[in-house]
Amino acid sequence: MDSNNGILQKLKRYLPQIKKYAPLALVVVVLVVTFATCGRGEAPTLEDPEPTTIESPPPSEPPVDIESPAPSEPQIDPEPDPDPEYTGPFNPLTGLPTETDFTNIRPLAIMINNSYDSLPQLGVSKADIIYELLVEGGITRMLALYQDVNDVGNIGSVRSARHYYVDIAQSYDAVYLYAGGSPQANTALASRNITHLDGNLYTYIDIYFRDTQRLNTLGYEHSLLTSGTRIALGLVSHNIAMEHAEGYQRALSFAEDGTPQDGEPALGFDVRFSSYKTTSFNYDDSDGLYYLRQYGNPYRDGNDSVQLSVTNVLILKTMVSHIPNDSEGRLNVTTTGSGTGYYVNGGKYIEIEWSREDDYTSQFIYTLPDGSELILGQGQTYICIIPNEYDVSFE
């Protein structure tokens, strides 16, 4: 009993302190009990939410080390091969490509009327080369050269020969078509080895014909025509040899661009043949051609009204004189020997020299001031042969 009383006395002594620290003691007791309970595995008094289940991704294969390709240089399209040089056949009178090989084929040379009252001419716009020369009375006449007449249509009107036209036709080894001729021309044709088809002869009636409309409007002398079809058939039916003799070589040379390098401007010019006849040329830069005018009007082809245009113009100066004692006032025009002149192409002109040997079969040779060969531009050519005393003013 004494011991219990002792304990009570001690509690009383410490009671004030116990009261003071009772709340703290209570907290401690609660914490002790809580941790004790958790330690025994008992569920907590507060419900926790169920944990969220996160599925792990399936194990992947280890990454493969793939080397990135080295950056390549940008691809550059190769330049296209240049067009191969053309090696096919050419028209020997123009230098232009053709489907048919005419290298050894004789051309045709046709006399064309050019008096004002005979116009319009037919088929001249398709001639490869045209020569214009004086005849009596101050008028001119044309010699039209064709390498191929199949697509030309009607040609004419066909007129009579002069001996200097025979000279020119023979220089090309051409088949010469005409209708009658001067005494000098007839002598030349009879004495030389040149194929000639006279439209005044009944023999060649299949090659020539009289145009009814021209007979009624222009008269008999301006009505004789031929055509590409009639000529082609007639050459066969009359068994005309159309191949050059072995070894024949043409003198003309051509280039794609025949503009004279050291040329002077020639955008327009007039070529005077006489006080009566002048032919005018005007350059068109858009197509590189010279367009012709005569008798104050555009020089047109009556087949299709196309105005004549050419790539090259040659102006040859020579001696022109009257034949002594000729009652018709006929002329001598010198086509052999040598002389001066002009070459016009691409809006420019240059002085040239021409020459031709005195054997009638020789061809015209054209040279530049330095003695080198004249190279024509590919295309049609118009050649004016004028008296020495006339000159040309170029613009």
Image (tube, grey):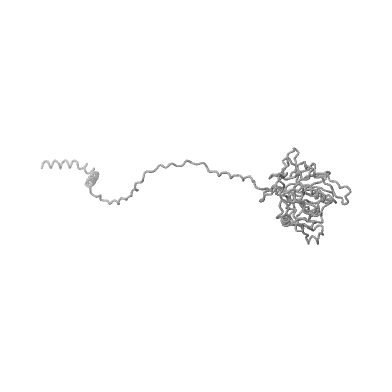
Residue at 55% in and 43% down: 76
Where does residue 97 sit, x and y in percent of width and height? 67, 48
Give the side of residue 13 with respect to residue 308, left or right: left
Tell which of 24 and 252 is nearer to you: 252
- The structure residue drawn at horizontal position 71% and vertical position 52%, both measured from the top left corner, is 148
Q: Position of residue 135 (x, y in %)?
A: 83, 50
Residue 179, quarter of the rendered image: bottom right
How many numbered discs? Answer: 0
Q: Quadrant of the N terminus?
A: top left
The residue lying furthest to the left in this view is 1
Taking the spot 14% from the left edge, 41% from the top edge, the residue there is 7
Asked if residue 88 shows in the view, the reply is: yes
- Front-most of residues 295 and 362: 362
Placement of the C terminus among the 4 image quadrants? top right
Q: Position of residue 364 (x, y in %)?
A: 76, 44
Horizontal and vertical percent position of residue 305: 74, 56
The residue positioned 75% from the left and 58% from the top of the image is 206
Residue 391 falls in which quadrant of the image? Answer: top right
Horizontal side, residue 167 vs residue 82: left or right: right
Q: Nearer the viewer, residue 117 or 99?
A: 99
Residue 285 can be seen, yes or no? no
